[in-house]
């Protein structure tokens, strides 16, 4: 039994398919199948039931999976203990975020990393949550800062905050942070929204359903920058968090109002891989992102509330 077999077990169990695990890990299917077969032979029991649609983990497989997850976490902890916590971090940490989070944290994150660990480099990438999740699981980023992530065995998830989404209009629209707008009133708005299937659009559509509202969009775009340009030009309103818009609001180029009944919101988390080591430098970067979020929430720039505690 070795670490590779345990990692393979975790990914195949999560995806229910050797072929999907092969695609995620970039390892040939026969090699992954052999790892599972060797593990089953050593344990003297089947960990999966094979069928035409893939592989379903057995009852004993679930128990082995729980132990495998803990073992890999302990190995990660042992590796971290071997590092000198007093030294300045070096190397490169790859951080993936959504486009809106990138607008919020990029500058303060780079500044704080440079001040604390001048020899630590950071590589930043931005993509929608679904794509960023794939990047993390394939090892293309060390940590990912994404929204509404469900529990996944191959990931360690640290909740950060619940972020409220606000109605955003042009300066002439005259919205105000001190004046909340019932969600039902959005029926009167020319809305600029992401396309169907976008996670932000899913949140808006669910709130419309709760409000008994048949919501439609005047313009659809998945580009954050395009949304802002259209709203600033007075061509409609949109629904976004305040933090990435704050400079425009502060300069009087955009106006915002909270939405109520219901309040559209989403949960931001920091995700780390559970099936490979997470270095202290990556943990430091994650903690720094949490620190930035807490400061912005306290100053009512990132509208919402902090949740959870780092592991």
Image (cartoon, helix red, strand yellow):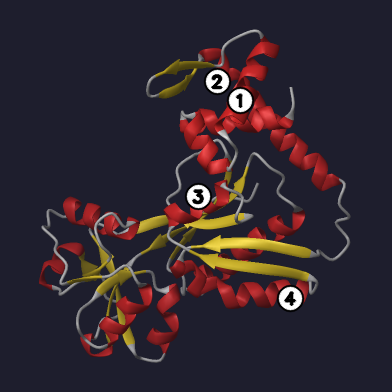
Where is residue 161? Give x, y as percent: 49, 57
| Mark carried by residue 114 | 4
Dot 1: within a 10 Å radius of its alpha carbon, few (fewer than 14), some, or many (20 or more) residues?
Answer: few
The residue under the point 42% across, 51% down is 148
Secondary structure at badge 3 equals: helix
Q: CA distance from mark 2 to mark 4?
A: 43 Å
Give the quadrant of residue 125: bottom right
Vertical position of residue 152 compared to residue 12: above or below: below
The answer to whether marks 3 and 1 mark residues whose Cβ atoms lie closer than 8 Å is no
Q: Nearer the viewer, residue 81 or 299?
A: 81
The answer to whether marks 4 and 1 mark residues whose Cβ atoms lie closer than 8 Å is no
Q: CA distance from mark 4 to mark 1?
A: 38 Å
Judging by the rendered image, the residue that carries numbered circle 1 is 66
Judging by the rendered image, the residue that carries numbered circle 2 is 62
Secondary structure at badge 1 equals: helix
Residue 185 falls left or right of residue 103: left
Dot 2: within a 10 Å radius of its alpha carbon, few (fewer than 14), some, or many (20 or more) residues?
Answer: some
Residue 213 falls left or right of residue 245: left
Judging by the rendered image, the residue that carries numbered circle 3 is 134
Q: Marks 2 and 3: which is nearer the front?
A: 3
For residue 210, say whether it is visible. Answer: yes
Counting residues from the start of the chain, the first of labels 3 and 4 encountered is: 4
For residue 268, say whether it is visible. Answer: no
The answer to whether marks 1 and 2 mark residues whose Cβ atoms lie closer than 8 Å is yes
């Amino acid at each position: 039994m070795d670490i590779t077999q345990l990692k393979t077990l975790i990914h195949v169990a999560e995806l229910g398919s050797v072929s999907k695990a092969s695609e995620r890990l970039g390892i040939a299917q026969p090699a992954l199948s052999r790892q599972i077969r060797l593990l089953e032979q050593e344990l003297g029991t089947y960990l999966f039931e094979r069928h035409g649609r893939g592989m379903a983990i057995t009852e004993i497989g679930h128990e082995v999976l729980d132990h495998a997850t803990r073992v890999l976490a302990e190995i990660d902890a042992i590796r971290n203990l071997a590092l000198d916590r007093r030294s300045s971090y070096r190397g490169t940490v790859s951080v993936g975020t959504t486009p809106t989070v990138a607008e919020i944290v990029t500058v303060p994150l780079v500044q704080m990393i440079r001040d604390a660990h001048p020899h630590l480099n950071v590589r930043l990438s931005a993509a929608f949550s679904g794509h960023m999740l794939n990047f993390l699981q394939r090892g293309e980023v060390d940590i990912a800062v994404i929204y509404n992530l469900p529990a996944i065995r191959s990931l360690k998830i640290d909740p950060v905050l619940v972020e409220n989404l606000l109605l955003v209009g042009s300066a002439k629209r005259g919205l105000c942070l001190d004046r909340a707008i019932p969600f039902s009133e959005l029926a009167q708005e020319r809305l600029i929204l992401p396309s169907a299937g976008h996670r932000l659009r899913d949140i808006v559509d669910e709130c419309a359903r709760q409000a008994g509202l048949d919501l439609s969009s005047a313009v659809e775009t998945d580009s954050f920058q395009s949304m802002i340009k259209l709203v600033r030009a007075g061509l409609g309103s949109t629904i976004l968090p305040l933090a990435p818009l704050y400079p425009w609001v502060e300069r009087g180029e955009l106006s915002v109002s909270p939405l109520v009944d219901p309040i559209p919101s989403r949960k931001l988390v920091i995700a780390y891989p559970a099936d490979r080591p997470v270095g202290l430098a990556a943990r430091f970067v994650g903690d720094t992102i949490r620190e930035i979020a807490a400061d912005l929430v306290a100053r009512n720039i990132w509208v919402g509330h902090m949740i959870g505690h780092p592991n």
